[in-house]
Image: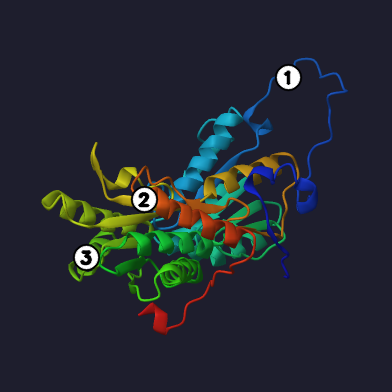
Amino acid sequence: MNKRKFGLALTSVVAAGAILGACGAKDKEEDKGKDEPAKGAETTETADDNFSIAMVTDVGGIDDKSFNQSAWEGIQEFGKANGLTKGDGGFDYLQSKGEADFEPNLNKLVRRDFDLIFGVGFIMADALTDLAAQNPESHFVQIDAEAEGDNVVNVLFKEQEGSFLAGVAAAKMSKSGKIGFVGGMDIPVINRFHAGYVAGAKAVNPDIEVQIKYTGAFDKADLGKLTANSMYSSGVDVIFHAAGGTGNGVFSEAKERKKKDPNADVWVIGVDADQYEEGKIDDKTNVTLTSMLKSVDKAVVDLANQGKEGEFPGGETLIYGLKEDGVKLADSRGAIPEDIDKIIAEYAEKIANGEIEVPADVTAKDKK
């Protein structure tokens, strides 16, 4: 199936529903408000009248302080705005402990008759493709990958663009001239983080040394900690992680070092959500430099609203970048000086207006 791809402003997706189309919308019952209800018939709104939504996490889990958590926050926001409660007929999630859980979890939500089901994470695409084919009347959203099906909407982000800004920040803040990148699995979405980060760092300091390590997991904090320990010990002073729950170990290592030596130059750049709290040591000390934000929560709300209005853009792939406010850097809360902030803003403008095209791919050599 050939999918059309769009870059859409998150804040205007619902308003621009006409350009997205109303493909794949579920058939709705004809309005019966003109008819008088039969004597004794139920006239109050029930759970069946609600537009229900649910999600399946990848292995990172609902509290990964990253994109699973951001998606769940979007689910909850939609539920609150529409007076829904957690559970059947409202909003819910199922957590996956491994890849073998993806298809059974998706199938459980189909059987529970949720109107819109979100699959979160690149490695869920195959399972969601299978379920979508088996359940053509159900509607699905695949986040961070492209699943097949006219009843599926795929949501992708230009992670490379936000990561470019993270690279600029890291290189300008580094005192040692050495920065690091800790990735989860070696997959296209993480490669985009990697490619953008290196490009941004090299743009402001061609001589910067960038250490790269893929841990192979999104749920192994111990691997993240071990990797960060090696990097910091070698002189790296800023690490950007794109590793989900594994990245929590990067924060743990940085905080331990900062506690032992308050003068230690150790920073972490968070991912997907604002991870400022994850880097907090006390009210005056925090190792989070900034975070590269992906507006997963806003995309979830936008698509849920479109589905509710019968404008679900089935078969489409939606792409969000800097121009669409889909990626950006979080407020550093003063950690990044004003002069460096201005440089970051200048690069952001150049990327948004097309003056700079950020690479999305990395070579095998670059991954070492």
Q: Are marks 3 and 1 in contact (CB under 8 Å)?
A: no
Q: Quadrant of residue 182?
A: bottom left
| Residue pointed to by mark 2 | 336
Q: Residue at x 34, y 52 (%)?
A: 289
Q: How many marks?
A: 3
Q: Is residue 300 left or right of residue 169?
A: right
* Residue type indicated by callout 3: Tyr
Report x, y in % for residue 366. 41, 80
Label 3 neighbour load within 10 Å: few <14, some 14-19, many 20+: many
Q: CA distance from mark 3 to mark 1?
A: 65 Å
Report x, y in % for residue 295. 53, 49
Residue closest to the eye, 270 or 28: 270
Q: CA distance from mark 3 to mark 2?
A: 20 Å
Report x, y in % for residue 144. 54, 60
* Residue type indicated by callout 1: Thr
| Residue pointed to by mark 1 | 43
Element at label 3: helix
| Residue pointed to by mark 3 | 232
Residue closest to the eye, 335 or 198: 335
* Residue type indicated by callout 2: Ile
